[in-house]
Amino acid sequence: MAYELYYWPTIQGRGEFVRLALEEAGAEYIDVARESEGVAVMMRMMEHADHPPFAPPFLKNDETIIGQTAAILLYLGARHGLAPKDPAGGLWTHQIQLTISDLVAEAHDTHHPVGIGQYYEDQKDEALRRAQEFRDDRIPKFLNWLETVLARNPSGDRHLVGSSLTYVDLSLFQAVEGLSYAFPKATKRALKTAPRVAALHHAVAERSRLKSYLASPRRIPFNEEGIFRRYPELDG
């Protein structure tokens, strides 16, 4: 049976990290909320599941429902060869994913530093202050840490873990894509000191399945409703 992915139908957001893993794996899946009445189906699932997800994205496989992006990728990585088979390698991969999740959360909070339920325009002054720290300190800190992980990989610096692609390589790609959209000037500066990160980002984009997906209508364009939003004033 096909996987059922539940996420908002008009944004990449956190669901895109899951989509990339499914696409790279060549797994059959249904993006449920993009189907007719799909959002209503997604909301009913959240209301009535025995183990209700806190929020999208969540993945359904037969009777198993998994919420939280990092947990979904942990599950898919083990099933589709996108993570090491040894426990230590799997745990290290999961740790990297959780750190990337921290980066994604901080990127979101640049445009909503006060409250998720308020409009950006209602917290613009606070956003300008938050974004300055993010672009000057936090983007370089995260990318330089990923650069260090690549440099210290005993199997070579082409992947974050081991000698073959894992789901965290895909997540690094998506994080750099999002940062490049939302903070193009700051990200370009930060990547100058993280050449291995830049090279991995480029290599992932050239993988055959991913390249086809990125050029297809299934890839939702970045927009100002998702996590990564382009407000030029926040890029300094």
Image (cartoon, helix red, strand yellow):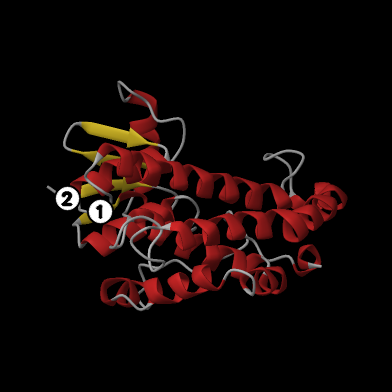
Q: Residue furthest top?
A: 50
What's the distance in space between the residues labelled 2 and 1, CA to CA? Answer: 7 Å
Q: Residue furthest right?
A: 125
Residue occupying the point 48% across, 56% down: 149
Q: Which residue is mark 2?
A: 2
Q: Is residue 131 left or right of residue 203?
A: right
Mark 2 touches mark 1? (CB < 8 Å):
yes
Task: Specify few, some or many for label 1: CA neighbours under 10 Å numbering under 14, 14-19, or 20 or more.
Answer: some
Q: Nearer the viewer, residue 73 or 168?
A: 168
Position in image of residue 203 (x %, y %): 39, 75
Label at residue 30: 1
Please tell me how crowded label 2 is: few (under 14), some (14-19), or many (20+) other residues with Cα within 10 Å. few
Q: Is residue 140 left or right of residue 81?
A: right
Q: Is residue 113 visible?
A: yes
Task: Identify whether 211 is placed above or below 86.
Answer: below
Q: Secondary structure at mark 2?
A: loop
